[in-house]
Amino acid sequence: MEQVDSGSSWIKRIVVAADGSPASDRGLEQVADLAARLGAEVVAVFVRHLPVTTLMAPGMTAAPSVEALNDQESEVRRDVTRLLGGSGVGWEFVVRAGGPGEEIVQVADETGADLVVVGSNRHSSLHNLLLGSTAAFLATHSKVPVLVMRPREISSTVDATAEVIGGMRS
């Protein structure tokens, strides 16, 4: 893979959301390739998010959910290490707790990111209306462009679709 002189690109640091989903893994794969080509650094962000609805059931405690989050974090950390560790790019793994969109925007701001990459699983409009969409939140709140990665369709011969839905705001 040929590396472009990093001085020729405006993309120096990429924040990528990592949650273990197929779309997230696709985003990590593409970011590893893009960062290597541009000489950019990568900040992979895993957000520990415990939905309020998890604790609404009578007698429900946070213990099983926290254990599931610990397992998910370990799995995502392994995926990030596997996909970025051998890519030859500088990278770090950041763990935050809170709302995914808000935390990813905050990490992008704190690290001086030039691009945010997030996976999207094509939820229905009703799902997005009721539960919100991290990709939609990032597109409206990020100060830098947002690249939304779609997982590859098994039945399709077309490669994954990437949509740039965010833009630079002054």
Image: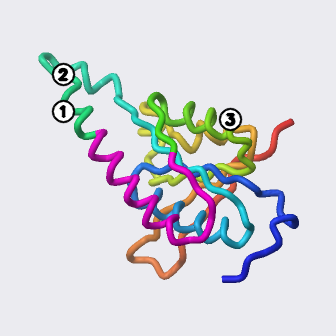
- Please state, as top left, top right, bottom left or bottom right, where the C terminus lies in the image: top right
> Disc 2, disc 1: CB below 8 Å?
yes
Q: Main secondary structure of the magenta part?
A: helix
Judged by depth in the image, the label closer to the viewer, 1 or 3, is 3
Residue 49 spot, x, y in % from top left: 39, 33
* Residue position marked by numbered label 2 in the rendering: 61
161 over 17 or under it: above or below: below
**First in sequence: mark 1 or mark 3?**
1
**Mark 2 element type:** loop
Numbered badge on residue 135 = none
Please, what is the three-letter code of the amino acid marked with disc 3?
A: Glu
105 over 14 or under it: above or below: above
Q: Is residue 111 left or right of residue 22?
A: right
Q: Nearer the viewer, residue 125 or 36?
A: 36
**Mark 1 element type:** helix
50 over 169 or under it: above or below: above
Residue 120 spot, x, y in % from top left: 50, 53
Mark 2, residues whose alpha carbon is within 10 Å: few (<14), some, or many (≥20)?
A: few
Residue 89 is one of the magenta-drawn residues = yes
Please, what is the three-letter code of the amino acid marked with disc 2?
A: Thr
Residue 137 spot, x, y in % from top left: 59, 36
Mark 2 and mark 1: Cα distance apart in space: 7 Å
Numbered badge on residue 110 = 3
* Residue position marked by numbered label 1 in the rendering: 64
Residue drawn at point x = 79 percent, y = 75 percent: 4
Q: Nearer the viewer, residue 58 or 3?
A: 3
Residue extent of the magenta highlight = 69-93
Residue drawn at point x = 55 percent, y = 51 percent: 92
**Mark 3 element type:** helix
Residue drawn at point x = 83 percent, y = 57 percent: 10
Q: Nearer the viewer, residue 26 or 75?
A: 75
Mark 1, residues whose alpha carbon is within 10 Å: few (<14), some, or many (≥20)?
A: few
